[in-house]
Amino acid sequence: MNKTDKYINLLDAEKKAKKLFDEILLKNFIEPGITENKLSSKIYNLAFDMFGIKQYWHKRIVRSGINTLCPYKENPINLVIQKDDILFLDFGPIFDGWEADLGRTYVLGKDPIKLKLLNDVEECWHITHSYFNANKNMTASELYKFVCSLAEKRSWEFGNEHSGHLIGAFPHSKIDGDNFESYIHPKNHLTLKGENKNGDKLEWILEIHFISQKYNFGGFFEQLLTRN
C-alpha cells in the first residue's frame, strides 16, 4: 500500500461515517425523552445494519445538556435528552480496517445561543482547516493556539487540553495523554505535515469543542483534517 492509498482509505471511511450520521437524522433518532445510552445503542445497531460495524476504535459518545461541557476522557452520568436540548455525537467506527472519527452537534428547538454555538463549531472547524492548509510548516501547538483564539473571538472557551489527534489504520499507534506528539496539543511543537518513522504522512483529526460555563453547555465538531 502506498501513501496515497492510506489517505484515500481514510477519506472513504469518513464518507461512510457521514452517511451513518445522515441516516441518524433521517430516522429521527434524536428526540426528547431518550437517554444518551439508549441513543448510542440505537446508532450502534444502525451502523451494524448499514455497514456491518461491530468494532469502534474509541468509546462511543452521546452527550447532552451539561454533559456537553465534558472533554473526551470524562465519563459523566447518563442523561435524558430534553426538549430544546443541545447534544453532540462522537463516534469512531472502523470500516474495512480503517478508522473514522466524526463528531457533530445537534440542537432541539430554536434557542438562539445554542444555534449560534452549533454554527460556530462547524464554521470554526472550516476556518481552522483553511489556516492549516495555508501554512506548510505549522506545528501542532500553533494550530491549538489558533483554535483557542477562535473560541475566544466567538465568546466561548475551548473545552479540551488538545484539539485533535492522529488517525490511521486500525489499530494505529496508541495515543495517550503523556504522548503529546500524538495530539494537536500546546506541548507538541512538531510539524503537523510531517511523516512518521515509516515515511508515511501524518493524518490528523481536528476537534472543535467550544463550551460556555455561563450557559452550562458546549458544542463539538470533528472530522479528518484533509489537506490540499
Image (spheres, grey):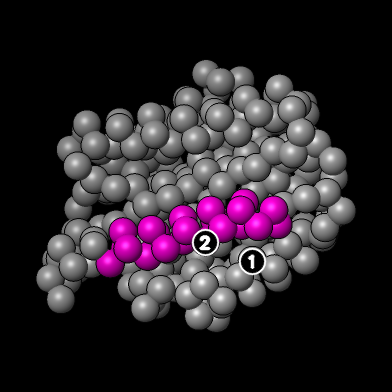
- Residue 20: mark in rendering: 2
For label 1, the crowd category at 10 Å Cα-Cα, with few meaning under 14, some 14 to 19 and many 20 or more, is: many
Majority secondary structure of magenta residues: helix
- Residue 43: mark in rendering: 1
In primary-sequence order, the first of circles 1 and 2 is 2
Chain part drawn in magenta: 9-29
Q: State the residue at coordinates (22%, 31%).
A: 134
Between the C-alphas of marks 1 and 2, the distance is: 8 Å
Assign a secondary structure to mark 2.
helix
Observer able to see residue 161 = no
Of residues 23 and 129, which is closer to you in this image? 23
Check the picture and name the quadrant holding the C terminus. Answer: top left
Tell me: residue 45, above or below residue 92. Answer: below
**Would residue 22 be counted in the magenta stretch?**
yes
Label 1 with label 2: CB-CB less than 8 Å: yes
Assign a secondary structure to mark 1.
helix
Locate residue 142, reporting x and y percent: 34, 35
Q: State the residue at coordinates (61%, 53%).
A: 26
Residue that sits furthest to the front in the current view? 26
Of residues 210 and 185, which is closer to you in this image? 210
For label 2, the crowd category at 10 Å Cα-Cα, with few meaning under 14, some 14 to 19 and many 20 or more, is: some
